[in-house]
Amino acid sequence: MGLEYLQIWADMEELFQPYDDAQRGRLIMAMMAYAYRGEEPEFTGVEKFIWPVLRQHIDRCTQSI
């Protein structure tokens, strides 16, 4: 995908609030795998509900470089 770093915006704190630490960790690792290697995660838990928003954020960042 071509990103050299992953942007975590301050307003994402609100998006991550309902999730526990393990879920947040899986989301962050998925964000990095998607941003750096284009790997699409296969979530089986509730993380799948927030993933489309996070993927759009990464895609917008990728398009701006």
Image: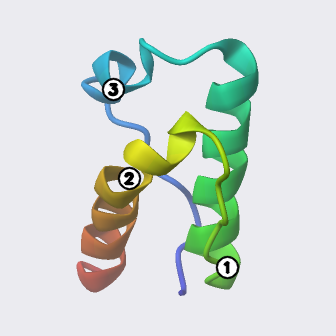
User: Dot 2 corresponds to which residue?
Assistant: 54
- Residue 5 quadrant: bottom right
Amino acid identity at mark 3: Leu
Q: Position of residue 4 (x, y in %)?
A: 59, 70
Quarter of the figure that contains the C terminus: bottom left
Residue found farthest to the front: 44
Q: Residues within 10 Å of mark 2 (few under 14, many from 20)?
A: some
* 8 to 12, vertically: above or below: below
Contact flag, marks 1 and 3 (Cβ < 8 Å): no
- Residue 42 quadrant: bottom right
* 27 to 39, vertically: above or below: above
- Residue at left 71%, top 41%? 26
Instruction: State which tag comes first along the sequence, 2 or 3.
Output: 3
Q: Residues within 10 Å of mark 3 (few under 14, many from 20)?
A: few
- Residue at left 62%, top 28%? 24
User: Which numbered circle lies on residue 15?
Assistant: 3
Q: Residues within 10 Å of mark 1 (few under 14, many from 20)?
A: few
What is the C-alpha distance between the residues marked 2 and 1?
Answer: 13 Å
Contact flag, marks 2 and 3 (Cβ < 8 Å): yes
What is the C-alpha distance between the residues marked 1 and 3?
Answer: 22 Å
> Circle 1 — which element?
loop
Q: Position of residue 22 (x, y in %)?
A: 76, 23
In the image shown, does 1 or 47 lie closer to the viewer? 47
> From the viewer's perspective, is 49 left or right of 43?
left
- Residue 33 quadrant: bottom right
Amino acid identity at mark 2: Leu
Q: Position of residue 43 (x, y in %)?
A: 64, 55
- Residue at left 30%, top 59%? 57
> Circle 3 — which element?
helix
> Circle 2 — which element?
helix
User: Dot 1 corresponds to which residue?
Assistant: 39
Amino acid identity at mark 1: Glu
